[in-house]
Amino acid sequence: MKTYDIVIVGGGPAGLAAAVAAKEAGNDSILILERDHELGGILNQCIHNGFGLHTFKEELTGPEYAYRFIKQVLDLGIEYKLNTMVMDIAEDKTVTAMNREDGMFQIPAKAVILAMGCRERPRGALNIPGYRPAGIFSAGTAQRLVNIEGYMPGREVVILGSGDIGLIMARRMTLEGAKVKVVAELMPYSGGLKRNIVQCLDDYGIPLKLSHTVVDIEGKEHVTAVTIAEVGPDRKPIPGTEERYTCDTLLLSCGLIPENELSRAAGVSMSPITSGPVVNESLETNIPGVFACGNVLHVHDLVDYVSEEAKRAGQNAVKYINDGCKKAENDNVIELVATEGARYTVPSTINVDRMDDLLTVRFRVGDVYKDSFVSVYFDDERVMHNKKRIIAPGEMEQIILKKTQLTEKAGLKKITVKIEKE
Ligand SMILES: Cc1cc2nc3c(=O)[nH]c(=O)nc-3n(C[C@H](O)[C@H](O)[C@H](O)COP(=O)(O)OP(=O)(O)OC[C@H]3O[C@@H](n4cnc5c(N)ncnc54)[C@H](O)[C@@H]3O)c2cc1C
């Protein structure tokens, strides 16, 4: 089998942007491995618009956005293999994959970019009482059925979970003639973007019931009704608040989890908060030469940020190879700490010598904060204090650090990101 400098696992927006950036940074030996029968990842089923406002200053559909990158991959002559499942990544960066034409094969690589995306949280983990009849789908599966396969999952719909996919599907099902009766959300806030609540629920008069969950599913062969109830601060249903909705479909939109079985098996250190790899300023994991980007690293709200992050992963993979595939020095490393409302940061550490002039640090919060400040401390000194009208878990936040700021502060050991009331 041929060897490649860079093997990219996943041909979604992250893998495509990483490949284009690596090629443009001067590397000609790149291979994308994609298990699906086409490039583009999850965007192929997202036929709604709203993609690319940051990157292209235009409103594109998911497939249109993906195609902009697929075209660049084709124009640049970057190699890719479809219908090819990556099974294993060894610590020496030998990638084992399988497809019908080649069978099982191995590719030794100098650098590997993890870009496997994420998957929906499985229903089994949600402990809903009641029967397990037909008519229960994850929102993403329903999206694929409606937008790609051309099937309607049902006509009367209840949605549990207000993540973006659930919100988008509330609108989609309505446009296709279904009646979406309610969206129930366990948390006291939505897990989705504000713009999706307005454009997908409010505009269609679909009620969103926060602090509510499904407590019963009726129907032996097929769903016939769903009962929801209000939950208290302990997230337990409050007796007497039950409301029964007759319906034939229950869609579940209860969160996404990075697709990290491969990363874990490869020995990549994982964050218990994001369920994605722990990375440094170069988006490099604890295994030198293994980089991560996109939803496999942490679940993003906007694909524009995925593309931007993936571009850095591609460029850094080339830099790693050009520098002789050396392990990053561990001196002059600053730890990033998320606390008091901030749940995590990507990256987790910064090697000042290796960072670019500007470094975007992304994070999410664990609750809704109104009229609060995003604060950044260099050791004990507060250096950033940005007021925000609203900070919510559904929207990713970011701060930008300047290299000069960090080099000026000699001996800096820790950067803390937190949310403050004043
Ligand atoms: C339903 C939905 C609606 C969305 N709506 C919006 C929106 O309106 N606006 C917006 O900006 N963003 C939206 N997003 C977010 C955006 O689509 C994602 O942020 C983006 O697709 C993530 O890109 P990715 O490449 O990391 O992952 P993906 O697109 O999931 O791509 C990962 C790829 O890796 C492949 N893969 C995984 N494992 C393997 C393996 N072992 N071997 C080979 N290949 C593998 C997969 O098949 C897939 O093609 C939405 C996302 C979803 C799911």
Image (tube, grey):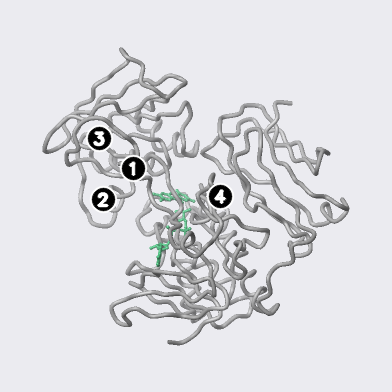
Please give the residue where the numbered disc 2 appears in the rendered image: 146
- Say which quarter of the image contains residue 392: top right
Q: Are marks 1 and 2 in contact (CB under 8 Å)?
A: yes
Where residue 144 appears, x then y in whole percent? 29, 53
Q: Amino acid at mark 4?
A: Ser
Between disc 4 and disc 1, whose residue precedes? 1
Q: Give the residue number, with chain letter if any, for mark 1.
A: 169
Residue 71 — which label?
none
Instruction: Give the CA separation, mark 2 to mark 3.
Output: 14 Å
Q: Are marks 2 and 4 in contact (CB under 8 Å)?
A: no
Question: Under tag 4, what secondary structure?
Answer: loop
How crowded pointer 2 is (Cα within 10 Å; few <14, some 14-19, many 20+) is rated as some
Do the residues under discs 3 and 4 have CB atoms within 8 angstroms?
Answer: no
Q: Quadrant of residue 305?
A: bottom right
Cα separation between marks 1 and 2: 9 Å
Distance of mark 3 from mark 4, alpha carbons? Answer: 35 Å
The residue at 46%/53% (across/down) is 258
Q: Amino acid at mark 2?
A: Val
Residue tagged 4: 271
Amino acid type assigned to the residue bearing label 1 in the image? Met
Mark 3 or mark 4: whose residue is earlier in sequence: 3
Report which residue position mark 3 lands on.
157
Q: Is mark 1 within 8 Å of ligand 1?
A: yes
**Residue at the location (77% across, 60% down)?**
357
Dot 1 or dot 3: first in sequence order is 3
Rounded to the nearest angstrom, the CA distance separating label 2 from label 4 is 34 Å
Q: Quadrant of ligand 1?
A: bottom left
Question: Which secondary structure, mark 2?
Answer: helix
